[in-house]
Amino acid sequence: MEPALHRLIDTLAGEKGATAFMAQLGRRADEMNTRQVAALAAAVAAAADSHPDEVDTYAYIYDSVRSLLIAAPGPESLRRLLHLPTALRPDAELRAAELLAEELADTRSADELADTVFTGPLHRPSLHELRVCLLQELVLRSVQINEIPHLAAFAASPAAAQHPLGRLPATLLAVERGVAELVTAEQHLGWPTPLNPYRRADAAERSPAPHTGGAYRLAEVRDPAQRVAIGTAVQHWSGISNARITAQIFAVNREVDPHDIDAVFAGLPLECAPEGAGTLTPLLDTTATTALCVLFLAASSGGAYGGRRGNGYARLAAWESMAALAGTPAAAPFADLAAQAEETHWYLFDTQGPWFYRVAWDVTMAALRPGRRELAVLAATDTD
């Protein structure tokens, strides 16, 4: 290990010690090989055990040292990385594995990852989590899993199938192409906020003339399980900030003509529109692809105070919300989920009114289900 840094490990507890270590690390980083970096990270992790009250300081230092291994090219750095804990807090290792998977997928080739991460023994429980999450990260980057033997073998293994992410397909569905673009894009398709691509001017321009041939009668369907399922993509916002989340389902007495959607929507007793749902119209018709993108972004980015998930879990949460909005059982095969989503009429609506914070974390979505006699609505908003 680099002697100067080794001497500083014992002084890490406290602000001055951490500052001195980081300054020395910045000067020495280019001179250290992967073996030295890995040894330094292991020493920091060991020292943290003796200073439980300073674990946050040690975690910051540890992550900084470990990032050198993540960035270092070649399989040797990756092998050494796999012998290190993904986080210094044992209760944070699985969540850290999600984000490590994202970093590795961004910086390493699929072949290199297959030959290192997906071979050999599991040195720690978090390595299995890393493998499962990394498989999903590669799928979302359009890697052909079945063409790389180690990846294909893991995807077909019972260990992968028994994981919560194991029910996700190991190939991209056509409706997920937009999500795949988001994963690799520097900006979210140019949308004005991180989450909500609604524009009133676009909605007004595309709003069709009503074809109402008679009155629509609406009745709310009070199904707590469906409401929870609809909100899956944003559920992790609550509890850590000021999130408001609402999901509602309405039955209609006859098929809704899509030309009448604004009028029908305006008559809904929405929890997110105390002044009347008409203030949130005109609706903006959109595609299943864009709807899935909105839900995926909501799940992956987290709320005002963070809580973001890795892309694999975000993919699963987005699909669970989409399935519930479209009225499809969550356990249905993904081919059925995708087909039902494509048959659903999707809409975004405005965030005018006192219920929405209108900062950056707003999600609005309405789904006219196949058969056009049920309408599901999701709204979420958050602020710091």
Image (cartoon, helix red, strand yellow):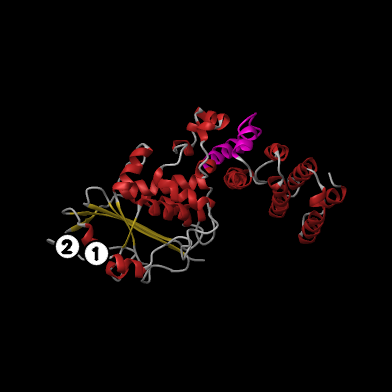
Q: At 46% across and 46% down in the image, what residue appears?
A: 315
Left or right: 63 in relation to 381: right
Towards the viewer: 88 or 191: 191
Q: Position of residue 378 (x, y in %)?
A: 35, 57
Marks 2 and 1 in Cβ contact (< 8 Å):
yes
Residue 123, magenta (yes or no)? yes
Residue 200, magenta (yes or no)? no
Q: What element carries label 1?
A: loop
Q: Give the residue number, with chain letter if any, for mark 1.
A: 208
Left or right: 111 in relation to 248: right
State whether residue 83 appears in this view. no
Q: Position of residue 101 (x, y in %)?
A: 59, 44
Quadrant in which the N terminus appears: top right
Identify residue type, mark 2: His
Q: At 52% across and 44% down in the image, what residue appears?
A: 141
Identify residue type, mark 1: Pro
Q: How far apart are marks 2 and 1 (CA)?
A: 9 Å
Q: Quadrant of residue 34?
A: top right
> Is 37 rendered above or below residue 122?
below
Q: Give the range drawn in magenta.
A: 110-136
Q: Residue 211 carries which label?
A: 2
State whether residue 40 appears in this view. yes
Q: Position of residue 346 (x, y in %)?
A: 32, 55
